[in-house]
Image: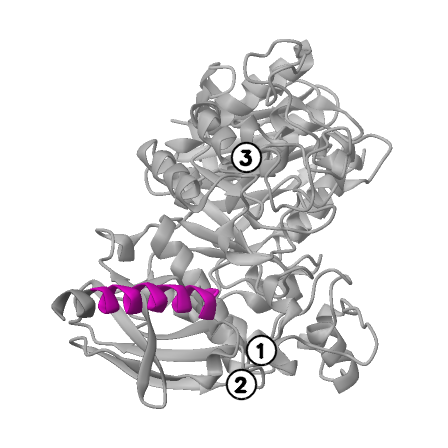
């Protein structure tokens, strides 16, 4: 009898496990942590007719099942757990019942937090960010180029196809990136994009909890973050709250009609970003801006659905806690519901007070960009929790100034509008990025002008970001195709004839610009006056633009000459210098001792540490 009972018990156990596997195919987030500020967690449970079950939580000290919410689709349940501050790590057991009998149990893990995770230091003005498009950087593991189950297969000959760059490639390049003077890495989205084509860019996510296997695994990504941290480098994750990919798993079986923003016929966003401020904007235009889709392959998520809002907030917190990233770049920041974005940002900052998030607001008017920065008093009463914003106005003005043979006025006057920003030092500044022509192309392939742009970005207020390949003058002459803009980094593939890492095959001009950038940004690493000093600039004169960074103990004089060789009279800058110039130019190591004039060569920048 005992033997029979034993085998019956084994059979029940096996059947229970099989039933559990068949009943639940998704459980997100896959785990949570004890000791989090965000301690009321809503679990998305997905499985065939899962809502026909009743749910209970096996007794677990300091954890309560608050609710099990059903939605229109019976294949979803949303289970809310309340986790007390004093709860201990361990495995919960969710009981799924019918007719008061347990059909199966689903384990759920509460983990201990990694030491000091709460105090992660986000990217800041002491950092210089290297932006990478992972698929196009370095192929560190060719074995994951083609992965079973991934619709799009590798085709390096296709400018819009998968080329094979991956997480391991970034790991292999950490020392090279650090040697150039960079202290942080921002990668374009790394999560799964299982789309039929044109998936390499990463902005059509099909699984918010999974690194794309063609890049590696979740564990490999976390290991990359840890290895970067060991080298004194931070990692910034690119996220998207506005949309997902059309092939996202839930698009085949939506929880409810209002999970995404749906229209009778396909409606694209009108991109009218002024509606957030416009006192005369119509409801129609406002709705089209926020609820319209970016493209037909990217469904627009409805953050006004409270469950969707919870899902996105929890997903963000999960990735920070899991991986240890030091920052987020939020794609298309103004396009989701703006009140949700405030709540999302506030939740992240409440959990990680020293963290940083930069929002993408691609518009050329600082009146609009500044709307999204924390501390701005807006006419419509909207308040933001976002610390940092991408400074597209300065980028545009810098290019216009460098291409204008007569004046630096564009960038001088744009910088003069910093009074619009609550914190201009916390803006991310850049000569280009992955969505626009390379700076070398924007400046008509003039390497001297690129060096001037790099000097400006490295020394003006803000947090500098450089796109991979700028250091070797990568360009896209004659085309605006993103596949060409995001060209493979030379040397990132085994048979490349040119290697930017070893400099094999680089031209003398490319080597010169790479050395220039490296010297500039390695100096910047320890230049506290550039990180946090004040700024004063002088009106441009004869193609020369001069500004100073200064604090109580240090002064740095930045001279940008985009014209012919000329001589500067020191007396024009007595307001800051106080007398003749004494100092050292950091790019050439030339010293100045009590001089009353400075000779500057044509199309040259100078960065002088004033003594």
Q: Secondary structure at mark 3?
A: loop
Q: Residues within 10 Å of mark 2 (few under 14, many from 20)?
A: few
| The image quarter in which residue 44 lies | bottom left
Circles 2 and 1, Cβ within 8 Å, touching? The answer is yes
Q: Earlier in the sequence, mark 3 or mark 2?
A: 2
Tell me how the rendering is colored: one colour
Residue 19 among those drawn in magenta: yes
* Residue named by callout 1: 255
Q: CA distance from mark 3 to mark 2?
A: 38 Å
Q: Check residue 166 in the rendering and tell me which mark sits there, or answer none.
A: 3
Task: Name the one closer to the observer, 490 or 367.
Answer: 490
Answer whether residue 341 is visible to the viewer in this image: yes
Circles 3 and 2, Cβ within 8 Å, touching? The answer is no
The percent coordinates of residue 107 (x first, y second) are 30, 66
Give the left or right position of residue 425, taking residue 337 as reference. left
* Residue named by callout 2: 71
């Amino acid at each position: 009898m005992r033997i029979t009972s034993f085998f019956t018990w084994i059979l029940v156990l096996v059947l229970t496990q099989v039933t559990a596997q068949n009943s639940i195919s998704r459980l997100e987030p896959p785990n949570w942590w004890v000791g989090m500020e965000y301690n009321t967690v809503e679990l998305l449970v997905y499985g065939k007719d899962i809502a026909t079950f009743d749910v209970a939580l096996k007794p677990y000290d300091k954890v309560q099942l608050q609710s099990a919410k059903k939605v229109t689709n019976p294949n979803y349940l949303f289970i809310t757990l309340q986790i007390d501050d004093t709860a201990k790590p361990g495995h919960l057991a969710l009981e799924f019942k019918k007719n008061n009998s347990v059909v199966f149990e689903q384990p759920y893990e509460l983990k201990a937090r990694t030491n000091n995770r709460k105090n992660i230091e986000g990217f800041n003005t002491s950092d210089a960010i290297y932006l990478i498009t992972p698929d196009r950087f370095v192929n560190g593991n060719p074995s994951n180029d083609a992965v079973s189950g991934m619709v799009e297969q590798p085709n390096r000959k296709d400018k819009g196809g998968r080329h094979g760059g991956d997480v391991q490639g970034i790991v292999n390049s950490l020392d090279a990136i650090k040697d150039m003077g960079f202290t942080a890495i921002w990668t374009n989205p790394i999560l799964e994009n299982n789309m039929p084509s044109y998936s390499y860019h990463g902005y059509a996510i099909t699984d918010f909890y999974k690194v794309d296997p063609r890049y590696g695994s979740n564990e490999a990504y976390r290991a990359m973050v840890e290895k970067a941290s060991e080298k004194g480098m931070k990692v910034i994750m690119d996220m998207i709250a506005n949309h997902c990919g059309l092939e996202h798993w839930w698009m085949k079986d939506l929880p409810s009609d209002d999970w995404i923003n749906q229209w009778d016929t396909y409606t694209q966003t009108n991109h009218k970003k002024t509606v957030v401020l416009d006192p005369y904007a119509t409801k129609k235009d406002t709705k089209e801006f926020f609820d319209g889709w970016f493209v037909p392959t990217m469904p627009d998520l409805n953050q006004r659905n409270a469950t969707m809002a919870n899902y996105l907030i929890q997903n963000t917190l999960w990735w920070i806690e899991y991986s240890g990233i030091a920052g987020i770049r939020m794609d298309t920041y103004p396009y989701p519901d703006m009140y949700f974005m405030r709540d999302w940002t506030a939740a992240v900052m409440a959990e990680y007070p020293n963290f940083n998030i930069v929002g993408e607001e691609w518009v050329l008017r600082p009146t609009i960009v500044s709307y999204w920065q924390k501390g701005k008093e807006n006419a419509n009463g909207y308040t933001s929790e976002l610390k940092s914003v991408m400074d597209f106005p300065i980028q545009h003005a810098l290019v216009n100034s460098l291409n204008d043979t007569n004046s630096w006025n564009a960038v001088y006057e744009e910088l003069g509008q910093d009074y619009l920003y609550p914190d201009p030092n916390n803006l991310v500044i850049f000569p280009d990025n992955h969505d626009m022509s390379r700076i070398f192309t924007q400046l008509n392939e003039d390497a001297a002008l690129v060096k001037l742009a790099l000097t400006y970005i490295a020394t003006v207020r803000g947090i500098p970001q450089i796109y991979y390949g700028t250091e070797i003058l990568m360009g896209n002459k004659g085309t605006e195709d993103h596949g060409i803009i995001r060209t493979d980094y030379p040397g990132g593939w085994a048979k490349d004839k040119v290697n930017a890492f070893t400099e094999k095959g680089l031209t003398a001009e490319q080597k010169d610009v790479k050395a220039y950038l490296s010297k500039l940004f390695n100096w910047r690493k320890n230049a506290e006056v550039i990180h946090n000093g004040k700024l004063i600039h002088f009106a441009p004169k004869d193609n020369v633009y001069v500004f100073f960074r200064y604090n109580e103990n240090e002064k740095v004089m930045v001279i940008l000459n985009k014209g012919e060789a000329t001589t500067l009279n020191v007396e024009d800058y007595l307001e800051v210098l106080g007398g003749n110039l004494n100092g050292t130019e950091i790019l050439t190591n030339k010293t100045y001792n009590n001089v009353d004039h400075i000779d500057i060569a044509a199309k040259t920048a100078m960065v002088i540490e004033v003594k």
